[in-house]
Image (cartoon, rainbow, N blue to C red):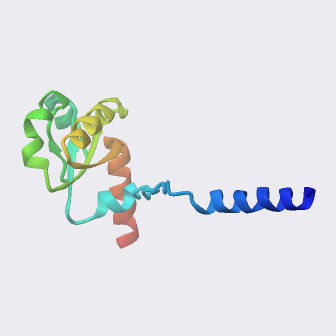
Amino acid sequence: MKIQFFGLVLAMAFTLSACKTSHTTVTPKANIKEVVNSSDVTLVDVRIPEQYSAGTAKNAINIPLAEIQNNIETLKGKKVVVFCNKGVQADQAMEILKKNGVEAYDGTSWKNVKAIQDETNKKAN
């Protein structure tokens, strides 16, 4: 009797574990270096114009965080990397862009994005 009961419990355990239907899809984390260096990327510096003009990453456009919402349509359908001084504004911009269906990546700071570009240029030479 004990063996039959054990066999029943074992069979139920196998059945239940085999019936799991919740599949969690793991989205691979994008390699920011590859994204920054891809030919179809739009680099967006979300700092104020004065900070942008004092220094930014190569080929970056300036759309201050306060204006990001008004520029959603121009960024839709593009691969966008956002960055600022330390990443705080970039995080806020990411939230706005993703909520509105823009393919956005966090470059954190302009110095980080520029360093990625400089590293790639050194390897190319």
Q: Is residue 125 visible?
A: no
Residue at position x 32%, y 50% in the image: 114
In the image, residue 64 lies at what x, y percent? Answer: 16, 32
Q: Nearer the viewer, residue 68 or 55?
A: 68
Residue 61 image-quadrant placement: top left
Q: Is residue 104 visible?
A: yes
The residue furthest bottom is 125
Check the picture and name the quadrant holding the C terminus.
bottom left
Left or right? Give the position of 70 relative to 100: left
Q: Nearer the viewer, residue 92 or 111?
A: 92
Residue 71 image-quadrant placement: top left
Residue 29 image-quadrant placement: bottom left
Left or right? Give the position of 79 relative to 31: left
In the image, residue 78 lies at what x, y percent? Answer: 17, 56
Q: Vertically, is 89 above or below 20?
A: above
In the image, residue 40 lies at what x, y percent? Answer: 20, 63
Q: Vertically, is 73 above or below 1?
A: above
Residue at position x 50%, y 57% in the image: 21
Q: Nearer the viewer, residue 34 or 74?
A: 74
Q: Nearer the viewer, residue 69 or 45?
A: 69
The residue furthest right is 2
